[in-house]
C-alpha cells in the first residue's frame, strides 16, 4: 500500500507538472481536485508508514509540513478559480507541484 500511495502522489504531481493535459487533467478545476487528492494520498501514506515503523518521526513531521503547505496552496488555487482568476489558479497549481515533490521526497 505504501508504494501505491506514494505512486499516486508521484503520478499526480507529474500530471500537474506535465501541463495536465498529457495526464488526463484538462482543466484547472481537475488540477485542483488532483492537488487535493495528492495531498490526501501523501497524508495517508505518511500515517501508514509511521504505523508500520517505516517512517521516522522527523520524516513524518517533514511530510506533514509539506502536506500542510500543499493543502494551503490547493485552497488558494480553488479560491482563485472560484473568483474566475484562472491564471492565478494555474500559478498556484504550479506551486503545489513543487510542494508535492517535497512531500514525495519526505516519504522516501
Image (cartoon, rainbow, N blue to C red):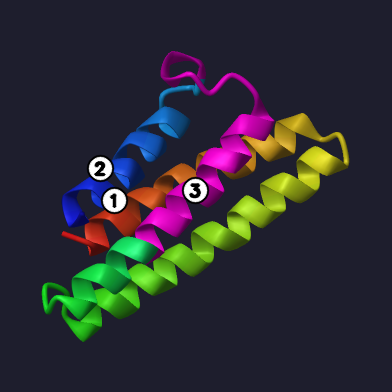
Q: What residue is shown with label 1?
A: 5
Q: Quadrant of the C terminus?
A: bottom left
How far across and how far down the image is residue 67, in percent? 44, 64
Q: What residue is shown with label 2?
A: 7
How far across and how far down the image is residue 90, in percent? 64, 34
Residue 36 within the magenta-colored segment of the rendering: yes
Circles 3 and 2 in contact, beta carbons < 8 Å: no
User: Which stretch is magenta?
Assistant: 21-43
Quarter-of-image position of residue 102: bottom left
Q: Quadrant of the N terminus?
A: bottom left
Sooner in the amino-acid sequence: mark 1 or mark 3: 1
Depth check, front residue: 77 or 46: 46
Q: How many angstroms separate mark 1 from mark 3 (CA)?
A: 11 Å
How far across and how far down the image is residue 83, in percent? 88, 42
Residue 99 visible, this orientation: no
Sooner in the amino-acid sequence: mark 3 or mark 2: 2
Amino acid at each position: 500500500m505504501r508504494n501505491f500511495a506514494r505512486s499516486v502522489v508521484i503520478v499526480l504531481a507529474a500530471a500537474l507538472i506535465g501541463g495536465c493535459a498529457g495526464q488526463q487533467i484538462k482543466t484547472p478545476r481537475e488540477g485542483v481536485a488532483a492537488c487535493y487528492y495528492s495531498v490526501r494520498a501523501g497524508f495517508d501514506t505518511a500515517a501508514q508508514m509511521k504505523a508500520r515503523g517505516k517512517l521516522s518521526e522527523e520524516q513524518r513531521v517533514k511530510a506533514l509540513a509539506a502536506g500542510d503547505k500543499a493543502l494551503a496552496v490547493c485552497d488558494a488555487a480553488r479560491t482563485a478559480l472560484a473568483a474566475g482568476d484562472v491564471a492565478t489558479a494555474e500559478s498556484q497549481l504550479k506551486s503545489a507541484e513543487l510542494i508535492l515533490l517535497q512531500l514525495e521526497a519526505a516519504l522516501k
